[in-house]
Amino acid sequence: MAARGLLTQPTAPARRGLLAVGLVLATTLIAFEVTAVITALPTVSDELGGDSLYGATLAAYTLANIVSLVAVGGLIDSRGPRVPYAVSLATFAVGLAVAALAPSMWMVLVGRLVQGVGSGGLIPVSYAVINRLWASEEQARIFAWVSAGWVLPSLAAPGLAGWITNAVGWRWVFMSVLPLVIATAVLVLPAMSHRALAGTGTHSAAESRRRLTHAATLAAGIGALAIGLQSSLVAVSVPLALVGAIGAFHAWKRLSPKGVTSAAHGLPAIIACRMLATAAFLGVDSFVPLAADRIHGASATVQGFVIIGAAVTWSIGSAIVSKMPSLRPQRAAAVGFVFIGLGVASTSLVVDSSWPLPATFATWCLAGLGMGLLFVPTSVAAMTHADEGSDGVVASQVNLADSIGFSLMGGLGGASVAVADRGDWTLRTALLVNFSAALVLALLGLVLAGRIRGKSGPTDTSTVSEEFDDRGIISP
């Protein structure tokens, strides 16, 4: 599908640049909050005596994110992106304030839950806006910039969050994100009032409730699966994990395009490959710092440094493919999976205490490059399948695949580490299980990448003629 709302007046590109900056800033604030909170959370837990809720506080954000991803997708189509974006920003800000003022770990958990609801609505809106306001040949460049919004936080947030925590207290880690929320609202919301971004979908209230029910079932199923896998009581763990897995699978199948379980050609294959790529990448990325700590005795700074290069090469990969508009998405995805697989296989050597950590830094950069090569072309290809009035749902499906990949590998990987913590395995064995699973997923993605297809059709670049007024607001 072409960008239905392409701006064609001479001044439009410069003014659209302000909107693009706002969309990148939204990604940056999410990335900074996630990275910074992970850095500060051990101190939060120590001060509030919340070790028993540590894992739940991390999981609450992700599971709430899944529900809001689905809810906002339908709202974008029926009401346009502006209202759900404003509500998501406001909800995210409330969550930050709740966590910053929390008197107990329970309230921090509530704050993280609210933040997850808010952040889940921002990225699908970005996808839909890009699809409506930029022509297909321009979208790769904008998606690359949005993807690059993760780089600076990945580089700076851990150190900055650590400094803020030590200097003025962990509460200011949450509060420091609020100015970014305000800046994003100022840049983005005024530009979303134009008719090109008006709601055009026909989603009924009943359909919206159905999708929301499936989203809640999916989140609950993933949560039950993770808890079941980490429980040491077989009588509890087996039925809980089984029920959770079945419920999550059926809910995901109903929220995804038909044919996703067999990775049918087109959008189903894109969704399947995105989930495989995210799971393979995060199945290693989340546990390399643990290996650096427990096996190599590295400091907290070194633990973060080992994986930080992947964020940079991810951005480099995105920039490369954004300058290659003729590159077919299935070929870009295949090359991306090759690099991810190479990165996973070579980085697995980190479980050997004699393996140098600088080498791990270099090998993991390969996986980051692969993600960058894969992410932008699959995002653009996915949005070509969005018919008028459905780009919100398609955007939520793509981002839901990313979120599920992260959640599943976090749960499975956490379960293997929990088994090692109980003494049934060594940590080295647990990590090798995680890394082997990630490699299998990358190889499966390579096999399925050839099924990825964009939806062919003429590109309409003139259906909407519009301009910005002197304040930088899109005017009819």
Image (spheres, grey):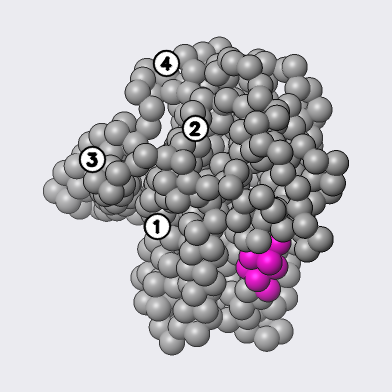
Disc 2 crowd rating (10 Å Cα; few below 14, some 14-19, many 20+) is some
Q: Position of residue 294 (x, y in %)?
A: 57, 54
Q: Nearer the viewer, mark 2 or mark 1?
A: 2
Residue located 47% across and 79% down the image = 98
Which circle's residue, 3 or 4, is located before the other in the chain?
3
Query: Which residue corresponds to mark 1?
Result: 64
Query: What range is drawn magenta here?
Result: 179-187
* Whether residue 74 is visible: yes
Disc 3 crowd rating (10 Å Cα; few below 14, some 14-19, many 20+) is many
Who is closer to the viewer here, 21 or 197?
197
Who is closer to the viewer here, 387 or 415?
387
Query: Which residue corresponds to mark 2?
Result: 388
| SS for dot 2 | loop
Q: Position of residue 436 (x, y in %)?
A: 50, 30
Who is closer to the viewer here, 73 or 347?
73
Q: Nearer the viewer, mark 4 or mark 2?
A: 2
Identify the amino acid type marked 1: Ala
User: Does the magenta stretch mainly form a helix, a strand or a loop?
Assistant: helix
409 sits left or right of 195 in the view: left
Identify the amino acid type marked 2: Glu
Query: Which residue corresponds to mark 4?
Result: 264
Label 4 to label 1: alpha-carbon separation: 29 Å
Which circle's residue, 3 or 1, is located before the other in the chain?
1
Label 2 to label 3: alpha-carbon separation: 31 Å
Disc on res. 247: 3
Disc 1 crowd rating (10 Å Cα; few below 14, some 14-19, many 20+) is many
Which circle's residue, 2 or 3, is located before the other in the chain?
3
Which circle's residue, 2 or 1, is located before the other in the chain?
1
User: Which image quadrant for residue 318?
Assistant: top right
Who is closer to the viewer here, 129 or 11?
11
